[in-house]
Amino acid sequence: MSALVATVALLIVAYVHVNIPRFTGRGQKRFIAHAMLLMVGIVFGVLSAMLAGTAAPPWAVFVTGLGVVHVPALCVLVIKRLRRSGRS
């Protein structure tokens, strides 16, 4: 079960990072969006893996934590896609 959750989390991360360029202007804004999501996701994933104990394999907890951080960005990108928004 943890492998399935980790796979879904990785798909969320991939979707977000593939679609950020479609909705974000070039240059510093795009770099900051990628960097902040990855940095916060990695920190959250590491802390989650450290605190999870034996509930699940540490790699699965790390990847799931990384994906959880990307869920709000996923929601924003899906809404922008549904509204057919341009770059901001």
Image (tube, rainbow, N blue to C red):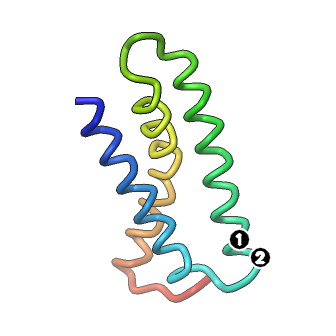
Graded by Cα atoms within 10 Å as few (under 14), some (14 to 19) or many (20 or more), the crowding at tag 2 reads few
Please report the residue visible at 41 percent of the width from the left and 11 percent of the height from the top. 54
Q: What's the residue at 65%, 45% (across, down)?
A: 40
- At 39% across and 51% down in the image, what residue appears? 10
- Quarter holding the C terminus is bottom right
In the displayed structure, would residue 29 be above or below residue 60? Answer: below
Quadrant housing residue 51: top right
* The one of 57 and 78 positioned closer to us in this rendering: 57
Numbered badge on residue 18: none
State the image coordinates of residue 55 (x, y, percent, origin top left).
37, 14
Q: Is residue 70 left or right of residue 15?
A: right
Q: Which residue is mark 2?
A: 28
On the image, which quarter does residue 41 sit in? top right
SS assignment at label 1? helix
Location of mark 1 (residue): 31
Percent coordinates x, y for residue 2 in the rendering: 29, 30
Work out how far the residue at label 1 is from the one at label 2, CA to CA, in angstroms.
Answer: 5 Å
Instruction: Kindly identify the amino acid type of the residue bearing the numbered disc 2.
Output: Gln
Q: Position of residue 43 (x, y in %)?
A: 65, 37
- The one nearer the camera, 27 or 3, is 3
Q: Is residue 25 above or below residue 65?
A: below
Residue neighbourhood size for the residue with mark 1, other residues' Cα within 10 Å, grouped as few (<14), some (14–19), many (≥20): some
Residues at discs 1 and 2 in contact (Cβ within 8 Å): yes
Q: How many marks?
A: 2
Query: Which image quarter holds the N terminus?
Result: top left
Kind of residue indicated by mark 1: Phe
* x, y percent for residue 47: 61, 26
Q: Residue at x 50, y 52 (%)?
A: 70
For this orientation, the residue located farthest to the right is 28
